Image (cartoon, rainbow, N blue to C red):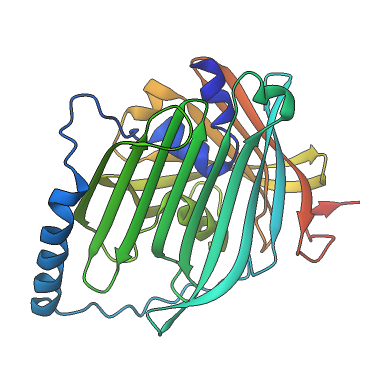
Amino acid sequence: MGLRMMLMGGSIFVLLVTLFLPRESTRGEAWIPLSALADTLAEESRLDSREAFPRKLDRVVPNHAFDVGEKLTFVVRYGFIKAGYATMEVREKIVVNDSFPSYRIVSTARSTRTFDLVFKVRDEVESIIDARGIFSWQFTKKLREGGYKFDLFVNYDQLFGKAHVKMIRYHSDEPLRIKNQEEFVIPIPEYVLDVLAAFYYVRTQDLEVGVPVIMNNHDNRKVYDLKVIIQKKERIKVKAGTFDCIKVQPRLKGEAIFKQKGKLWVWLTDDERKLPVLMKSKVLIGSITTELVHIEGVPLPLKSQIN
């Protein structure tokens, strides 16, 4: 358990999912075969869409924080042990539904070669984020962590307020064999965000100490009110440089889950880019640190960077 928790902290979004949001499980749940649900759900969705009036997605969120080409590389440590590396990358700009320019953002986490011998991790998460309103259109999570193999696919029908979710759990051996799978549709509020998109949304905001940022966040079966507390300003030194930073802490609004599973702090550069410089978490098994080691596709030096 300890090794898995350590390496699942391979990137910021993974820690958010792992430590603070309920994890998908086959225990105590009725997993319904995809073949028995797919046709019914598709037909219900088409009928509902014809009857519903589409939302007017007119939100505009100014974004001076990130753009295509940005790639951030992190080293992940459990205590003093180098466990793996993570990346967060704005890969390209695409058009969704022939109308909505959007960013394709990909984050990866992988264990080091040495740690592969003990616990191999190859995770990839992708989010399609509306470039104008900074909200989610699509989310994909592919986890390969030791014997744990899980895929999550979400299409966000923002116009009609529905998320179409598909979850697949695989057997632990290779090649991949499906153990169980499920597909369902849940209602979503306007401009809902997946966990990776939520992080990029926070980066676009004017962060003021003491003033929280609150957003609707979706993961698996539920939508949560996610609150990010802006705690204080600090100067932080990492391998990528020394930066004046803003320290923030994500919390689930109205939930006690943080007290049960751990705490997370993230240091963002105190400038318009708000790059994640450092992340620290405390969990039952110890502490995880994710440190920025390399910056690509961003004009340097940053305004917050100390020479």
Left or right of 93 in this view: 97: left
Q: Nearer the viewer, residue 247 or 46?
A: 46
Where does the image place residue 91, in percent across and percent down from the top left?
Answer: 62, 65
- Residue at horizontal 35 percent and vertical 33 percent from the top: 23
Q: Nearer the viewer, residue 203 or 231?
A: 203
Is residue 213 visible to the viewer in this orientation of the structure?
no
Left or right of 33 in this view: 252: right
Where does the image place residue 50, in percent across and percent down from the top left?
Answer: 11, 79
Where 248 falls versus 54 (above or below)?
above
Number of numbered callouts drawn = 0
Where 263 falls versus 210 (above or below)?
above
Residue ranking furthest to the front: 175
Q: Nearer the viewer, residue 37 or 307?
A: 37
Residue ranking furthest to the bottom: 99
- Residue at horizontal 40 percent and vertical 85 percent from the top: 99
- Residue at horizontal 47 percent and vertical 57 percent from the top: 197
Is residue 267 visible to the viewer in this orientation of the structure?
yes
Where 3 falls versus 250 (above or below)?
above
Where 198 falls versus 291 (above or below)?
below
Where does the image place residue 79, in percent across and percent down from the top left?
Answer: 68, 19
- Residue at horizontal 29 percent and vertical 50 percent from the top: 166
Where does the image place residue 183, in percent across and percent down from the top left?
Answer: 23, 50
